[in-house]
Image (cartoon, rainbow, N blue to C red):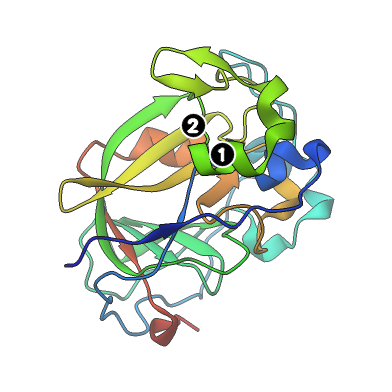
Amino acid sequence: MSDVNRRFFLAGLPIAGLALGLGACSQTSSANRATLTNPIAYTPLSPMPSSASMYGPVQDRFPIDAVDTSDINPIYLRREVDYTGREAPGTIVIDPSAHFLYYVMPGGRAMRYGVGVGKEGFGWSGSATINSKQEWPDWYPPKEMIARRPDIKPQLTQLQSGIGMHGGPGNPLGARAMYLWQNGKDTLFRIHGTVEPNTIGSNVSSGCIRMINQDAIDLYNRVAIGTKVVVLGSGSRTS
């Protein structure tokens, strides 16, 4: 596989939209193409806990507010669904076009989460692995982003690994982050939480896969380091 070519496209966003528009991720232009075809069957849906219980307040290292799910299309709320694909239990399958992430479970089932992706969709498809996981991760914006957006500098400070923002309630990466690597290299893409849950199901920010914080915590608790992540291409829509 050729090295991924990264480009950042966050221009002209107001500082008030920091959490919405500034992720730690990048757009890529080339990668292996996934070959999955129609791996997901959406019905029947199994009963799930109420939205109030799934998306209520969470007492974590930092408190997480309850989510107003009335601002989110119900299809993007966490549900267990049938899975008819060939990926083994424990695999994550992401369908960026449909704004869904699936965690494959035993018995032909999968947990489905709604996600948001970048303004231009998602820049690559194929397989990656979760190389690391972090709770309330620090955020390190690329130098190109800082140069283009000098207005974000007051939000940044010198951290252990460079200029960035400490993890916390206002951090664009939210409560959890899972870091995707490919061929031994950091893709700069992450699966992470967000403080803007109303953006789930849409294309905004810099291209990462973002989830409602409560969903990011749920997925984080299910996956291990080394988990396989399959990102479907535009020709592999699941519906």
- Secondary structure at badge 1 equals strand
Residue 85 place in picture, x, y as percent: 28, 74
Residue 165 place in picture, x, y as percent: 57, 22
Near-viewer residue (215 or 181)? 181
Q: What residue is pinned by disc 2?
A: 176
Residue type at the position of mark 2: Arg
Neighbor class of circle 2 (other Cα within 10 Å; few <14, some 14-19, many 20+) is many
Residue 5 place in picture, x, y as percent: 35, 61
Residue 115 appears in the figure: yes
Near-viewer residue (25 or 89)? 25
| Residue 112 to residue 171: above or below | below
Q: What residue is pinned by disc 1?
A: 193
| Residue 52 to residue 46: above or below | above
Q: Are marks 2 and 1 in contact (CB under 8 Å)?
A: yes
Question: Tag 1 or tag 2, which sits nearer the N-term?
Answer: 2
Q: Residue at x 40, y 75 (%)?
A: 40
Residue 50 appears in the figure: no
- Secondary structure at badge 2 equals strand
Residue type at the position of mark 1: Gly
